[in-house]
Image (cartoon, rainbow, N blue to C red):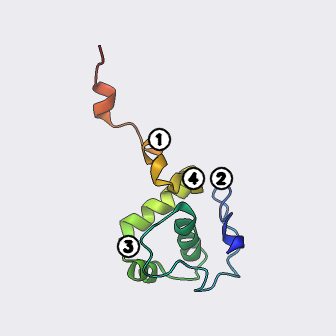
Amino acid sequence: MEDNVRLYELSGVEILPCTSTTMVDLPPPDTKRWVARRKAVVVNAVRSGFVSLDEVCRRYDLSVEEFLAWQRAIETHGVAGLRVTRLQIYRDTPPARLAKVRF
């Protein structure tokens, strides 16, 4: 598991080789708490061809859109972009907030 800690460099999208990844390295199918590292392991496994997107979606009960959102977050902001607590910072500012005038 230690190899999976730095799956992506925070400044880029570089994928580390996934030759040592096994089903044991993937999170268990009943995972409820998706921390950034677990999401990154799953995205890395799909990108490296170790497991298919369909299999991941079935195994973890994910939608394709949710998986693609994880992938986009990594591409845009690195693994830190997967942190739920950072979503508001990394999201584009909604137009409603821009139009709101404060007195």
SS at mark 2 in the image: loop
The residue labelled by disc 1 is: 89
Camera-nearest residue between 92 and 27? 27
- Asked if 31 appears above or below 96 in the picture, the reply is below
The residue labelled by disc 4 is: 80
Q: Counting residues from the N terminus, which is met first, the one under dot 4 or under dot 1?
A: 4
Q: Counting residues from the N terminus, which is met first, the one under dot 3 or under dot 2?
A: 2
Across and down, in percent, residue 4 comes to: 66, 70
Q: Counting residues from the N terminus, which is met first, the one under dot 4 or under dot 2?
A: 2
Camera-nearest residue between 49 and 96? 96
Q: Counting residues from the N terminus, which is met first, the one under dot 2 or under dot 1?
A: 2
Residue 18, quarter of the rendered image:
bottom right
Dot 3 crowding, Cα within 10 Å, few <14, some 14–19, many 20+: some
Residue sitting at x 65%, y 81%: 21
Which dot marks residue 62? 3
Amino acid type for the residue under numbered disc 1: Ile
CB-based contact (under 8 Å), mark 2 and mark 1:
no
Residue sitting at x 58%, y 76%: 45
SS at mark 3 in the image: loop
CB-based contact (under 8 Å), mark 4 and mark 2:
yes
Residue at mark 4 to residue at mark 1: CA–CA distance: 11 Å
Residue at mark 2 to residue at mark 1: CA–CA distance: 16 Å
Dot 2 crowding, Cα within 10 Å, few <14, some 14–19, many 20+: some
Q: Is residue 25 left or right of residue 59?
A: right
Across and down, in percent, residue 79 comes to: 58, 57
Residue at mark 4 to residue at mark 2: CA–CA distance: 7 Å
Q: Counting residues from the N terminus, which is met first, the one under dot 3 or under dot 4?
A: 3
SS at mark 1 in the image: helix
Residue at mark 3 to residue at mark 1: CA–CA distance: 24 Å
- Asked if 30 appears above or below 95 in the picture, the reply is below
Q: Is residue 1 left or right of residue 99?
A: right
